[in-house]
Amino acid sequence: MSLINVKNLTFSYDGSFDNIFENVSFCIDTDYKLGFIGRNGRGKTTFLNLLLGKYEYSGKIESSVEFEYFPYEIKNGSDLTIDIACEKNPGLEYWQIAKELGRLGVPEDVLYRPFKTLSHGEQVKVMIAVLFTKENSFLLIDEPTNHLDAAGRKSLAGYLNSKKGFILVSHDRDLIDGCADHILSINRANIELQRGNFSTWSENFERRQAFEFAENDRLQKDIERLNRASKRTGAWSDRIEKTKFGAGPVDRGFIGHRSAKMMQRSKAIERRRGAAIEEKRALLKNTEHAEALKLDPLSAGGTLLEMKDMQIFIGDKMICGPVSFSLRSGERLILSGSNGSGKSSLLKLILGDDMRHSGTIYRKSGIMISYVPQDASGLSGDMSEYAKDRGIDESRLKTILRKLGFERAQFEKDMSALSEGQKKKVLIAASLCESAHIYIWDEPMNYVDIISRMQIEELIREYSPTMLLVEHDAAFRRAIGAETVSL
């Protein structure tokens, strides 16, 4: 056991006027299983890169362990997996990697296959297993679940729960709950470290927000009452002072004494008001304003989409099916299956892609579809031009993105400079700007932060749009009340 000490860490990117971190201090035990959470764009990956020594910063990061980062670059995917593992850990012995893969439910024979032939889930598990074979290492695991199917996420959670000494950046609530014993959260105003898993952190955070909102309301009422009292005492003091100069004999000393007492009372009220204002300023700095989102789905009764005995082929190989389902107005369906089972191909067929298939597909005449693709990496250019090209209202797009945690400065960036989570939010926000009969979203929650996921869940519950989705986040699937179609 040793410690990672972060002292007065301050960092900003070259050319930026705002610090991402400012005088941040905390201490991490290297035995922690640490879940790392926060809104997209707040600096989670940046902090991991600071630990790795990739950027210059002010302050101190002190540690006696070596940091290892996932995902790491695979130079040649054609190499055998065992060779790639030995390149990453030259001291690796076969029994070590075989043992780790066994805990992850991965057969040993993958080690003698070219790495690029492994499924995405197998690649993730192999890469993480190799890192855990390195001694005196503290792992920085950055969003391992993106594109990982539900079964893969569950086995990864169990594996990480058996380990210690890592920071896990993830937006999958079930994964963090299943393996974390501490939470590091990047809030609006600071970074906090708490004991417990995500559910513990969320409960504490909501309780504190509720207290701060109630305290804020109480202080606001106190300030308004003290403002009124201050005006009254000031007016009374002025009226009393004026009586010193009235007609006829007056006791100016007595009147001056009364006026002074009234002024003292006025100053006491001012001090109380000032203290209340300062106390109020200290509140709500970390409040996440998860504003409600809106949607205008189009209405169409009956069955909107139906597939019967659908099979999709690439060459002579069947990659999907046979599958049958129907989607009625107001229903939500999740396509579920392991990586490579053809979920995305099925969505593309529905959208009109020319793919070799058998079976029948029915799509109600005249229905409008809004689509969120799985891959957001191609987004680039000006956001205003993007809105114009897509035919959506720019101000509405930006309003939705503001509610999803975007800062105004991010609207001025080329979209290629946005984080992966921010890019995915642009695609989701654009879809929410469109009125459609069916919303088809392919793994929409990849890279998207937890608070934004909750906002989108609430939106779906309130407006009940007709939806066909591929999504592996179990908490999201439960929250929107979708039926499952297994491939």
Image (cartoon, grey):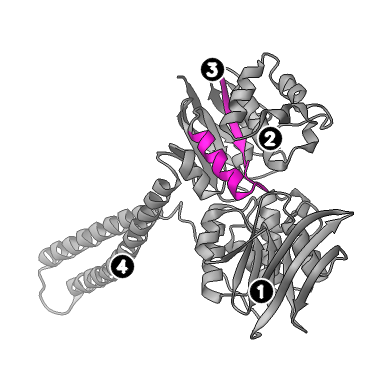
Residue in the picture at 88% in, 65% down: 354
Relative height, residue 178 to residue 250 (above, below): above
Foreground residue among 19 and 176? 176
Question: Residue at coordinates 39% horizontally, 54% vertically from top-left?
Answer: 283
Which label's residue is closer to the chain start, 4 or 2? 2
Residue 106 in picture, x, y percent from top left: 64, 34
The quadrant the N terminus occupies is top left
Expressed as whole percent of the image width and height from the top left, the position of residue 205 reads: 40, 51
Measure the alpha-carbon separation of dots 3 and 2: 22 Å
Q: Nearer the viewer, mark 3 or mark 2?
A: 2
**Magenta stretch containing residue 154, yes or no?**
yes
Left or right of residue 20, residue 25 in this image: left
Q: Residues within 10 Å of mark 2 (few under 14, many from 20)?
A: some
Q: Relative to 406, is 429 above or below?
A: below
Q: Are marks 1 and 2 in contact (CB under 8 Å)?
A: no
Front position in the image: 298 or 361:
361
Residue type, label 4: Lys
**Dot 1 or dot 2, earlier in sequence:** 2
Q: Secondary structure at mark 2?
A: loop
Circle 3 SS class: loop
- Left or right of residue 391: residue 265: left
In the image, the segment drawn in magenta is 136-161
Residue at numbered disc 4: 221
Which residue is under mark 1? 326
User: What residue would you read off at disc 2?
Assistant: 71
**Which residue type carries mark 3?**
Ser
Number of residues whose C-alpha sits closer than 10 Å to that of mark 1, classed few (under 14), some (14–19) or many (20 or more): some
Q: Which residue is mark 3?
A: 64
**Disc 4 versus disc 3: nearer the observer:** 3
Between 342 and 156, which is closer to the camera in this rendering? 342
* Labels 4, 1: front one: 1
